[in-house]
Image (tube, helix red, strand yellow):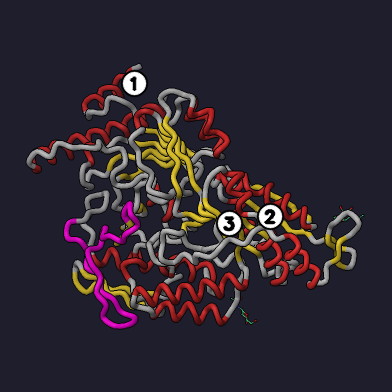
Amino acid sequence: MAPLLLCALFWTASGQLTGPLIVGKTFMAGSTDPTSGSTAWALTSHGISEKLFTVDDTGSIVPQVGQSVSKVDTFTWDVTLKSDYKFSDGTAVTAQHVADCLGEMNRLSSNAQASLGTMTLTARDASTVRIVSDRATPVMDAVLAEWPFVVYVVKNGQRYFTGPYLVAHFAANNHINLVPNTYYPRAAERPTLEIKKFADGNAVAQALEQGQVDMAFHLPVDELPALRQLSGITVKSFLVGYHYMMWHNSRREPLSDKRLRKAIDMALDRQELTQELRGGRPTRSLFPENSPYDLGEAVPHADKSGAEALIETAGWVKNASGFYEKSGAPLTVRAVAYPQRPGLVLMLPVIKQRLEALGIVVDAHVTSGSSWDELDGIIAGRDYDLLLWAQHTLPAGDPSWFLNSFFRSDGGNNHGGLNSTAVDDLLTDLGHAEEHITRVSDTRTVHQAILEEVPVSNLMTPSWHVGLSSRLSEYVPWGSDYYVIHSDFGLPATTSTTTGQSTDVSAAHQSWFSAIGLMACALLTSQL
Ligand SMILES: *[C@@H]1O[C@H](CO)[C@@H](O)[C@H](O)[C@H]1NC(C)=O
Ligand SMILES: *[C@@H]1O[C@H](CO)[C@@H](O)[C@H](O)[C@H]1NC(C)=O
């Protein structure tokens, strides 16, 4: 009883009359170590980490911890930092901190090597970082807005970031308690949060229905009609910056044969897939239609006879029940999807049915949703022929990161196993294209060269659905799962902007109170 009373007292004193907002997600950062896998992405999506530059709600590049960039020569840039930025422990961000953390990311994470190769970073003075890279870029602010380039400092083995929230408690694969970073603007107005991990979209939908979460991110389409009936629940649907795609593993048989990759790409019915998801737009283009990098070409329709002709040229013959065989062995592919993106799991049986009608045996497999381990193992062992995938292809507004990371021969995310000197050379050309109009035309050239090799079948730009309780009904999704908890999250829409200082001081004070209160509550309840 006593601990509960104490908690209530803290909440009241800090102006938080209600408990933390609970954000239910189908994915969660695996740790607070941004050098591991895609953790840096998740930490930013949780409101914990930030970068030197970022994109705003309209997709434009804007300064965040950085202020500006200036080009010294083809491989050398200077970045000037904002003068007033602090880590969540109160340490002022200096050029040396930035050189240290981005240097570490570049050494340890292949995702931080995609656009620039090896980087050498030095602090020229307290607020200027010099970056020398072995790969050129004409758009350094867009590169530094890529998700791996998060800013942090390590103190006593602990990492501190600069985002609106900091971790109060991290329970791996289960939940994270977040409190406002008191060194971030408007900290006192921010609610405390809990991010809760759910195994799949149906589980998070059920939690929303039962009033256990304030946000369900994101919902499978088959849950929407029932949720829309419930009072106090708002469902918002939005076209995302993601694309749904399917990698073709060309490193092993049978898809090492380009004719088979082409046949599968040709046989897919993208219209049928968007119908299954009741939303989204079919496209083969790797970039969204509202970007200058869209290929803007007609989507080829399900072409079964064209696909059959290609497979037959490759020496496969149908048996009496309509399945392809060669020397007595059936034409079989292993297709893998992961439940952290519910749409992929809904598309998998539709793709299987379509390919089986063509005469290909499909061994369809959905990985575990409780962690990324199974999927990571499958990717590391390259144990798939087809891999369904959700990817934000323009997270920083420029196509370089995605193209280099996923299609360069030595790219860290080359899931199709593309190994083409021609594509590598075109990517290098893109790295030197400075004028916007040249970037658009060079991107188009490499984009077409990539699709010609069929390392991937792009499927659609999907539309996603987020469910909200009345406490978050004003939430505006930012077009992906990248900035779910962005700097405006949970803030009152309008604020009384009385003359700064005194309000700010009491605000910061209140927020500390709230942070201490939450930690005390967490401690006490864990001891109950
Ligand atoms: C044709 O191949 C499929 C897939 O391997 C197999 O299930 C089926 O039994 C075969 N049919 C005949 C008549 O051999
Ligand atoms: C690409 O292919 C070439 C020639 O076959 C080979 O030497 C090279 O190791 C391959 N590169 C990768 C990254 O697999």
- Nearer the observer, 400 or 378: 400
N-terminal of the pair, mark 2 or mark 1, is: 1
Q: Residue at x 29, y 52 (%)?
A: 162
Q: Residue at x 55, y 39 (%)?
A: 220
In the image, is 247 to the left or to the right of 178? Answer: right
State how far apart marks 3 and 1 are (Cα).
Answer: 51 Å
Q: Residues within 10 Å of mark 1 (few under 14, many from 20)?
A: few
Q: Disc 1 marks which amino acid?
A: Leu
Q: Could you say which disc has been placed on residue 459 in the image?
A: 3
Q: From the image, state whether disc 2 or disc 3 is nearer to you.
A: 3
Mark 1 — residue?
Answer: 4
Location of residue 17 with respect to 106 vertically, above or below: above
Q: Disc 3 marks which amino acid?
A: Leu
| SS category of the residue bearing label 2 | strand
Q: Residues within 10 Å of mark 2 (few under 14, many from 20)?
A: many
Q: Residue at x 30, y 19 (%)?
A: 5
Quarter assignment of residue 233: top left
- Nearer the observer, 229 or 170: 229
Boundaries of the magenta span: 56-84
Q: Quadrant of ligand 1?
A: bottom right
- Residue 183 location (% of width, % of height): 22, 47
| SS category of the residue bearing label 3 | strand
- Residue 212 location (% of width, % of height): 45, 27
Q: Residue at x 7, y 41 (%)?
A: 499
In the image, is 521 to the left or to the right of 375? Answer: left
Q: Disc 2 marks which amino acid?
A: Ala
Mark 2 — residue?
Answer: 335
Location of residue 162 with respect to 517 vertically, above or below: below
- Residue 12 location (% of width, % of height): 24, 24
